[in-house]
Image: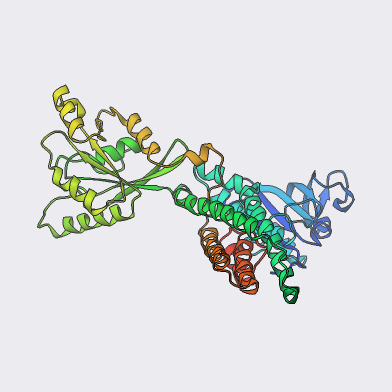
Amino acid sequence: MSKTNTIIALATPSGTGAIAVIRVSGPEAIEVSDTVFKSVRGKKLKNQKSHTIHLGHIIENEKVMDKVLVSLFKGPNSYTGENIVEISCHGSPYIQQQIIQLFLRKGCYMASAGEFTLRAFLNGKMDLSQAEAVADLIASDSEAAHEIAMQQMRGGFSNEIQKLREELLNFASLIELELDFSQEDVEFADRTQFNELLNRISEVLKKLIDSFALGNVIKNGIPVAIVGEPNVGKSTLLNTLLNEERAIVSDIAGTTRDTVEDQISLYGINFRFIDTAGIRETKDVVEQIGIDRTFDKIEKAKLVIYLFDGPGFDRSELENIKKRYPNKELLPLCNKVDALDSIQIEQLESEIPTVLFISAKNKTGISDLEKNLFSLVDAGALSGDETIVTNSRHYDALLKALEEIQKVKEGIDIGISSDLISIDIRQALFHLGEITGSVTTDDLLGNIFSNFCIGK
């Protein structure tokens, strides 16, 4: 990637559509566009104000390729910080490619994945965590994922990290100053205040680290395994939740021999429901493979629905799952409630205090089930507008920064020399800087932006 080149790419999805947008960015973006764009009013783009739109035609050798709208953004007040021209043309793939090839013949280069956003980062239009939020925003497929990405793009996470880094940097400067005057045996950094700062930074880092558990499932969807004995209505429940015939329903036990998955959004959060093979003893080799996969899905699920169909069910399997997966959120769910009388319901409630009652076939109690599933997710941070970490790279950097802060605290407690404390502080600053891009390497940038789509 070179900042001196003028780059071009299709900014909208490839294929046929009503319109397509082609983005051009770089030092020659406006000049090259002026050679192929003829405004209906005879205007040259270089003479027009930034953030204006112009109607005209894309022409090569007097041949009109398309009638287009051209949006003009002059640097540094643009997405990339450079001159940008965005061409809105008709959505024919042929027209899109003809215009792009025309610009390539005029000296432009095809943009690499994420190159527009990389230039925005390099030109100081956003920091690295905000740039990563752009990709998260494009990929967001639920209200919660969208909210988190928007907050990060606005700089909420960056500002929090930057404040911590600045405060730590101020004390690091005083520690470094002490080293310059080590022979005079003077102390510039108040150790009591420094300890208070380290405690506060540790608390903030721990809170951000803890938020990753929620952020990760919101970003990727919350896997919910529906398990139970054969023929209790697991597939019917999945179909009812999805409001479509996604899984095969039959009175024959053992119909589901492999897992069936699909997802829906409940209260702004994606839940990925997994219908599993019924758990039972079997000599059928294929069915046993399905049962083995059931336990594999339970292992990977965040929430587990244990479905049964009334009194007299074998509680031993429910207890086995509790013992086998003690850290899983387990929701006992009684199906076919319409076949139970009040005495049977009271009996089940006394035996299993957390049980819910539904009829998957008649859709009774499904709304209460959905509310209960949402309540099992610690979503309070969403409504409180708290910073939630969703990026595994950020999570790793926070863990490393916290580890270095703990070393600094231990060093002060046992009274080690300032030069050794200074090394650990610099490492903590390094890891915090990795998050916002104050510290970067070419490999890191290449890895991050290669995951972007072309045109962004």
Q: Quadrant of residue 107?
A: bottom right
Q: Picture coordinates of residue 360 (x, y %)? A: 26, 33
Q: In the displayed structure, would residue 35 be above or below residue 420?
A: above
Q: In the displayed structure, would residue 116 be above or below residue 52?
A: below
In the displayed image of the protein, which residue is found farthest to the bottom? 183
Q: Picture coordinates of residue 71 (x, y %)? A: 76, 47
Would residue 104 appear left or right of 316 to someone viewing this image? right
Task: State which quarter of the image contains the N terminus.
Answer: bottom right
The color scheme shown is: rainbow
Would residue 21 appear left or right of 367 to someone viewing this image? right
Q: Note whether residue 418 is visible.
A: yes
Q: Picture coordinates of residue 242 (x, y %)? A: 35, 38
Task: State which quarter of the image contains the C terminus.
Answer: bottom right
Could you tell me which residue is drawn at 35 percent across and 29 percent down? Answer: 367
Q: Quadrant of residue 31?
A: bottom right
Q: In the displayed structure, would residue 123 be above or below residue 265?
A: below
Q: Note whether residue 94 is visible.
A: no
Label count reads: 0
Q: Quadrant of residue 432?
A: bottom right
Question: Which is nearer the eye, 297 or 355?
Answer: 355
Q: Picture coordinates of residue 296 (x, y %)? A: 27, 57
Would residue 113 appear left or right of 299 to someone viewing this image? right
Could you tell me which residue is drawn at 44 percent across and 49 percent down? Answer: 217
Q: In the displayed structure, would residue 395 be above or below residue 263?
A: below
Question: Which is nearer the eye, 52 or 37?
Answer: 52
Could you tell me which residue is drawn at 53 percent across and 63 percent down? Answer: 406
In the displayed image of the protein, which residue is found farthest to the front? 185
Question: Which is nearer the eye, 453 or 324?
Answer: 324
In the displayed image of the protein, which residue is found farthest to the right? 47
